[in-house]
Image (tube, rainbow, N blue to C red):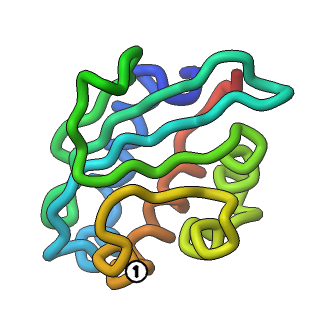
Amino acid sequence: MPKLFSDEWIKEYMKAINENKEYEEAAKDWEGDFLFVIEPDEELKEPLYGYLDLYHGKAREGYAIDDPSKVNAAFEFRGKYSNWKKLLNGEIDPIKGLVTGQFKLKGNMAKVMRYAKAAKILVDCVKKVPTELP
């Protein structure tokens, strides 16, 4: 089972995204890449970083990152490990998580809000990926 935000895990996640016709339709006009950041808390000692390039309803590229300064993504989505676990388990909606401050977004918030359905589907795709949590 691949570890969360490992290269293998991100490739499986991309496969789930690219096979999802509902996501393809919801994000057919989306253009933008993401740096995802899992911040340490009492359960996680070191941060985890993942990169995902999303374009017109498909994941074009993705990989684990050890140094976030190597990536200049249009968006950065970050939060504490405990909140990411809730997100991955479907206990937190990604947009509500932003509104309530459980997650932070750098980038064009209005654009992300226009694609709220696509964001929810991306989280649903995560549930299809076997995941070993750190």
Considering every residue shown, the one lying at the far bottom of the view is 114
- 125 or 104, which lies in front? 104
Q: Residue drawn 33% across and 80% down?
A: 110
Q: Position of residue 90 (x, y in %)?
A: 70, 62
Is residue 5 positioned above or below 37 on the image? Answer: above
Considering every residue shown, the one lying at the far right of the view is 42
Q: Quadrant of the N terminus?
A: top right
Q: Position of residue 84 (x, y in %)?
A: 66, 46
| Side of 114 relative to 100 (left or right) | left
- 78 or 128, which lies in front? 78
Is residue 69 positioned above or below 120 on the image? Answer: above
Q: Position of residue 47 (x, y in %)?
A: 58, 24
Is residue 77 positioned above or below 37 on the image? Answer: below
Is residue 78 positioned above or below 104 on the image? Answer: above
Instruction: Find residue 69 and report its image quarter.
Output: top left
Residues packed near mark 1 inside 10 Å, few (<14), some (14 to 19) or many (20 plus):
few
Q: Residue drawn 58% across and 68% down?
A: 98
Instruction: Find residue 66 and report its image quarter.
Output: top left
Instruction: Find residue 17 and report its image quarter.
Output: bottom left
Q: Quadrant of the C terminus?
A: top right
Q: Residue drawn 19% across and 69% down?
A: 30
Q: Report which residue position mark 1 lands on.
A: 113
Q: Position of residue 13 (x, y in %)?
A: 41, 41
Q: Secondary structure at mark 1?
A: helix
Specify the amino acid type for callout 1: Met
